[in-house]
Image: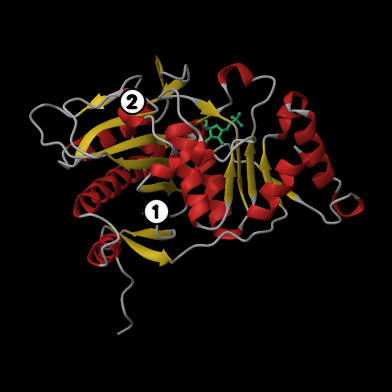
Amino acid sequence: MSTPTKTFMQHLFQQRHAGLIERDLTTLLHSVATACKAIANHLKNGDLGDAMGALESENVQGETQKKLDVIANDIFLERCQYSGVLAGMVSEEMEDIHQIPKNLPKGRYVILFDPLDGSSNIDVDVSVGSIFSIFELPEVPEKLTIEDVLRKGVEQVAAGYAIYGPSTMLVLSTGHGVNAFTFDGSIGEFRQTHEDLKIPADTSEIAINASRRRHWDESLRNYVDDSFAGEAGTRGRDFNMRWIASMVAEVHRIMMRGGIFIYPVDDKNRAEGGKLRLLYEASPMGFLVEQAGGAASTGTERILEVDPTGLHQRVGVVLGSANEVACALKVS
Ligand code: P6P
């Protein structure tokens, strides 16, 4: 009989036994995996279930909430706050820090998450995902404060995402490389399918919303125009473009085969600081990309070195294949 692939939990147990991660982080990541399974279960029924469509409400970002945005957020809260290892939680869908209910034990970890990224794609059955970032505090706080959670990305102890696509996958780094797991419905567990993912340093695949070209800074326009000029242009080779409007799907493609993803600060979003959120989108994705040998910049600085100023702060994002990110920034 061939050796069965490790489950997600067996992978975590191995890292714990090797002294790479703490027991409580294993507990938290188990809760996260359970939340992702539950969200995947809601998504797979599509319009056959009762979770599709939009609500009247808007989230803290001023975006129309999908029913599944709220359902996914509630699942993350429910599954993770009982873990007994959290000091509190931060979500794209909630304005303020979610304090752990007084009747539940607390711990030294903080999780910041986007429960359902790319949810505008749900109604058209395009891949969406959940993104999470985890920090460890020096001690269990009486009450989790903003100062506790405004931490640089370099301080993350773990980050990952689930992608709900043709298969449901969980991609995780605890600071020791990046590993990927595919959900196996026959046992109800994620099983390891990719070990120590590495992003190729070069690519010819650019993910950018080209409809915003008129808002870009000149240097970015020059980089994209040079690249799209193809073999006859200064780059001397043809490039391809992708845009799924789901960051998790773009980053997953880059994790699997390389590429560059760009959502820059531009004239239209400059007042907000950009489009993508630092703490629960850019920072965890930047951590994963760097752990896989890629690069992750705001366009002006390393994402993981940004000193956060707010829970829902936005930044520019240029991440992926290291040599291509350098090329895009050099032109900048
Ligand atoms: P646009 C989804 O709403 C998201 O936050 C990212 O997942 C995605 O990359 C981006 O916004 C898409 O933005 O402006 O193309 O709709």
Q: Is residue 242 left or right of residue 178?
A: right
Q: Is residue 95 visible?
A: yes
For image coordinates 14% across by 27% down, the residue present is: 101
Mark 1 residue element: strand
Against 93, is 282 above or below?
below
- Picture coordinates of residue 62, whole percent (x, y): 47, 16
Quarter containing the C terminus: top right
Q: Nearer the viewer, residue 151 or 1?
A: 151
Mark 2 residue element: helix
Disc marking residue 101: none
Against 189, is 34 above or below?
above
- Picture coordinates of residue 74, whole percent (x, y): 27, 31
- Picture coordinates of residue 142, whole percent (x, y): 16, 27
Q: Nearer the viewer, residue 179 or 38?
A: 179
Disc marking residue 147: 2
For image coordinates 24% across by 63% down, the residue present is: 13
Question: What amino acid is labelled 1 in the image?
Answer: Leu
Against 10, is 126 above or below?
above
Q: Earlier in the sequence, mark 1 or mark 2?
A: 2
Q: In front: mark 1 or mark 2?
A: 2
Q: Quadrant of ligand 1?
A: top right
Q: Which residue is mark 1?
A: 172
- Picture coordinates of residue 15, whole percent (x, y): 29, 63
Gap in Å between the C-alphas at discs 1 and 2? Answer: 26 Å
The image quadrant that residue 212 belongs to is top right
Question: What amino acid is labelled 2 in the image?
Answer: Glu
- Residue occupying the far right of the picture: 232
